[in-house]
Image: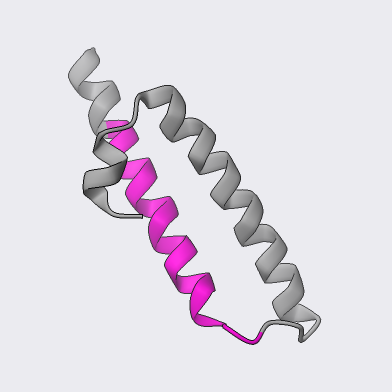
Amino acid sequence: MTSKEIRELSPGEISTKLREIRGQLGQLRLRKHTGQVEKTHELRSLRKDVARLETILKQKKSQAA
């Protein structure tokens, strides 16, 4: 997910997306510990997506205040 795509979303949609991606990240971490993950690079990309979402959400909240 790119920053441009995230900026087009509303703060509510960003929060929802953040919850979804954090859930995926948790499941992927669990699968990694059990040795079932083939594509370990997905962990890194999900962490980056979480960071992007949190950053843009904070920016939108500070602009609204």
Residue 53 in the image, given as x and y percentages of width and height: 37, 44
User: Is residue 51 located in the magenta-colored stretch of the structure?
Assistant: yes
Q: Which residue is drawn at 26% across and 33% down?
A: 8
Residue furthest left as drawn: 63
Magenta stretch encompasses residue 2: no
Task: Name the quarter where the N terminus is drawn.
Answer: bottom left
At 25% from the left and 49% from the top, the residue drawn is 3
Q: List the single residue furthest toward the top.
A: 65
- Closer to the camera, 10 or 26? 10
- Residue 34 lies left or right of residue 23; in this view the side is right
Name the foreground residue: 52 vs 3: 3
Q: Is the magenta stretch mostly helix, strand or loop?
A: helix
Residue 31 higher or lower than 15, as above or below: below
Q: Nearer the viewer, residue 33 or 17?
A: 17
The C terminus, quarter of image: top left
- Is 41 placed left or right of 51 in the picture? right
In the image, residue 65 above or below residue 2: above
Start-end of magenta stretch: 38-58
Residue 18, x across and y down, in percent: 50, 42
